[in-house]
Amino acid sequence: MTTRVTVWNENRHENKNPVVRDIYPEGIHGAIANALKGAGYDTKTATLDEPEHGLTDEVLNETDVLIWWGHLAHHEVADEVVEKVKKRVLEGMGLIVLHSGHFSKIFKSLMGTSCDLKWREADDKERLWVVDPSHPIVKGVGEYIELEKEEMYGEHFDIPAPDQLVFISWFEGGEVFRSGCTYQRGNGKIFYFRPGHETYPTYHNEQIQRVISNAVEWAAPVGRKYPQYGNAKPLEAIKDK
């Protein structure tokens, strides 16, 4: 069965900033969704200002992997929607958090840390080095991905130690950053991927699209039932002592 993907974006920069609108006329979510459709995924989009932010129970129940991009309006995302998304991740839905989504309520809730970092908008060159060449997320990617201009994110990045570190970024100004990190929470897989500032055409880059597509394949549910918790009956008779 084809993996079902929902690309979520707050869609505020596109409505406020003509530079962003020129780069992403269909929104950041539209650019990512179109690339994934081209890769063969069953893809739809959802945005902040839709009812329930576009993440109704029906949508979430029909989503295998959720992609999340947010920046200006993290505080506007309703806590009850965050809890629904978190529950689905624990049940097995994959989650890919992009760029400034590091500060989203859902990512911070799943990480349990501030998820803070250093940043700078100065047209830095970014070189994302593959540090786990055996990982399926880097299938078809060379030793590194080079982006001519991007926003800098720098250490210390206040996240738990990743289960697997896939990319480390170097920036022209001298900083480095853990820019591709995987986690498992409950039955769900999570991938944080750093690049994607709204005023740069990063999501039109074919290598970046390839990583996101690979991450969707990696994060897709494996089909195991959610474990049962609480009081349990014995599997075998317990002998009287």
Image (cartoon, rainbow, N blue to C red):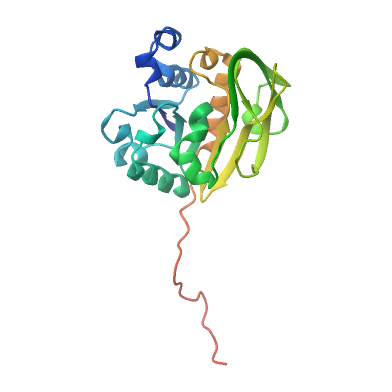
Q: Position of residue 148 (x, y in %)?
A: 64, 10
Does residue 142 show up? no
Residue at x-position 54% and y-position 42%: 114
Q: Residue at x 73, y 31 (%)?
A: 131
Depth check: give the residue in front, 125 or 40: 125
Q: Quadrant of residue 119?
A: top right
Point 38% across, 46% down: residue: 83
Q: Position of residue 227 (x, y in %)?
A: 48, 58
> Picture coordinates of residue 212 (x, y %)?
54, 26
Q: Tell me which residue sits at (45%, 26%) in the image.
A: 41
- With 24 as the anchor, is 205 left or right in this view? right
Q: Quadrant of residue 45?
A: top left
187 is higher (above) or lower (below) than 69: below
Q: Judge whether residue 136 can be spotted in this image.
A: yes
Vertical placement of 50 versus 188: above or below? Answer: above
Total numbered circles: 0
141 sits to left or right of 228: right
Decide: is 84 above or below 5. Answer: below
Q: Is residue 142 left or right of residue 233?
A: right
Of residues 60 and 128, which is closer to you in this image? 128
Q: Which quadrant, please, contains the C terminus?
A: bottom right
Quick one: 81 or 213, which is closer to the camera?
81
> Which residue occupies the extreme bottom position in the image?
241
Q: What residue occupies the far left of the structure in this picture?
A: 51
Location of the N terminus by quadrant is: top left
- How far across and how far down the image is residue 235, in percent? 51, 74
Identify whether 114 is placed above or below 47: below
